[in-house]
Amino acid sequence: MNIISSYSIKGGVGKTALAVNLAYALCESGHRTLLIDLDPQGAAAFYFRMGSAKKLRMQDTDALADGLRSNIRESDFPELDIIPSNLAYRNFDIVLDSMSKSRKRLRKVLEEFKPEYDAIVLDCPPNITLLSENVFRASDAIVVPVIPTVLSQRTLEQLTSFFHDEELPGDILRPFFSMVQKRNRMHRDIMAELPLSYPGFLKTVIPFSVDVEKMGLHRMPLLAYATKSEAALAYRALCNEILGKAVTQP
């Protein structure tokens, strides 16, 4: 079982769009896939026409695993299940802090799903908290959308510094450029320079596109309704690149 997280400190960079389309691409390629929406906003589940999860009992590892399992829902796509989010997820840090080995609990919980799924995709909230540390320690790959702007570049630097300071494996970070406007000179300049400092930078670029924004109208992955659009082709190429680096074929 591979655990792939879509994560960024910065919001509004295409994190959820990546998680949704990656989960779809995984199931499309024959992997039994579970998408877990950890962001209290619940956007990933919304894109799959699902409401909020039932409130979880989260007082210990077993209760948390049972609570997540009770919220598994089948999507409209074969081999793809979803665990929606809930506003109660804002309390994840408090719950984890009360547990022993609080930075490694999520990995233990997710291992409960190992017999049933080939891959788990996590859509993560945009912050660095105890839950984020659990995500970092649980993930086999962390895919990081980066808009080619100064602020987005700065958040990537903050993330890599955190990994260094906490002695986390930096080679699991997989940044890529998102929401790119090729006519923007600053975008072009940052795209030329930034990957030189990050060996794990993915090569595929996701363009800024209204087709991606329409995911909220269609309430399904871009790859399912606009298969020939420029953005969909880019997402498929990105997903294939991620799969080649992070997931063993079944």
Image (cartoon, rainbow, N blue to C red):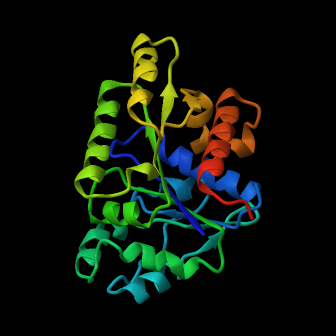
Query: How many numbered discs sit on the rendered protein?
Result: 0
Q: Position of residue 104 (x, y in %)?
A: 35, 74
Instruction: Provide residue 168's location: percent of width, then percent of height.
Output: 33, 58
What residue appears at the point 28 percent right and 79 percent down from the top-left corner? 101
> Can the viewer see residue 226?
yes
220 sits to left or right of 99:
right
Query: Quadrant of residue 128 in the image?
Result: bottom left
The image quarter in which residue 151 lies: top left
When the figure is inspected, residue 234 is found, relative to residue 34, above or below; the finding is: above
**Quarter the N terminus occupies:** bottom right
Q: Is residue 239 left or right of residue 100?
A: right
Residue at 71%, 29% (x, y): give it: 229
Q: Is residue 97 above or below residue 26?
A: below
Image side of residue 4 versus residue 173, left or right: right
Rendering coords of residue 208 (x, y %): 54, 26
Q: Which corner quadrant holds the C terminus?
A: bottom right
Q: Nearer the viewer, residue 177 or 54?
A: 177
- State which quadrant residue 195 falls in: top left
Q: Nearer the viewer, residue 86 or 197?
A: 197
Q: Nearer the viewer, residue 68 or 30?
A: 30
Q: Is residue 209 above or below residue 187?
A: below
Query: Which residue does the image show at 46% across and 58% down from the upper left?
Result: 42
Residue 180 picture location, percent across and down: 50, 24
Inspect this view and state whether residue 54 appears: no
